Amino acid sequence: MKGASQIAPFGLRMPEELKDKISESAKTNGRSMNAEIVSILEGHFFTQKAGGNEFLQVFREIRALDEARAKEYEEFFVENAKKDKPKE
């Protein structure tokens, strides 16, 4: 984070299991826990600013694409499984 040394530290108490979830998410995203928390908070306030509608619409479009792609893969694998099945 640019200018991090200029920002005063902020102590935060949280339940251990929440801390573990944030830690795991940070590892997955290749960030520090601090950067992960900042990203989560920025995402929250972006969603609020957009009234939730823009973010929700984008999320629905991505999910629809994923569902369509999953259906295509399923059909592909089912079709190939039929081809590969030994004849009796």
Image: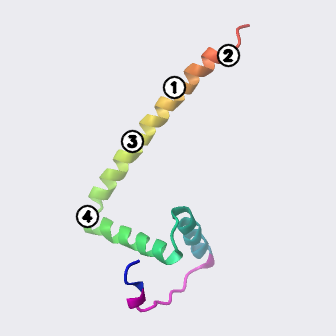
Label located before the other in sequence (1 or 2):
1
Label located before the other in sequence (3 or 2):
3
Q: CA distance from mark 1 to mark 2?
A: 15 Å
**Quadrant of the image containing the N terminus:** bottom left
Magenta portion: prevailing SS class: loop
The residue identified by callout 3 is 64
* Amino acid found under the numbered disc labelled 1: Glu
The residue identified by callout 2 is 85
x, y (%) of residue 62? 38, 47
The residue identified by callout 4 is 50
- Circle 3 residues within 10 Å: few <14, some 14–19, many ≥20: few
Q: Are the residues at dot 3 and dot 2 in contact (C-beta closer than 8 Å)?
A: no
- Circle 4 residues within 10 Å: few <14, some 14–19, many ≥20: few
- Magenta span of residues: 5-16
Mark linked to residue 75: 1
x, y (%) of residue 3? 37, 84
* Amino acid found under the numbered disc labelled 4: Ala
Label located before the other in sequence (4 or 3):
4
- Circle 1 residues within 10 Å: few <14, some 14–19, many ≥20: few
* Amino acid found under the numbered disc labelled 2: Lys
Q: Report if residue 7 is visible in the image.
A: no
Q: CA distance from mark 4 to mark 1?
A: 37 Å
Q: What residue appears at the point 41 percent right and 92 percent down from the top-left corner?
A: 8
Mark 1 secondary-structure assignment: helix
Q: Report if residue 2 is visible in the image.
A: yes
Q: Nearer the viewer, mark 4 or mark 2?
A: 2
x, y (%) of residue 73? 51, 31
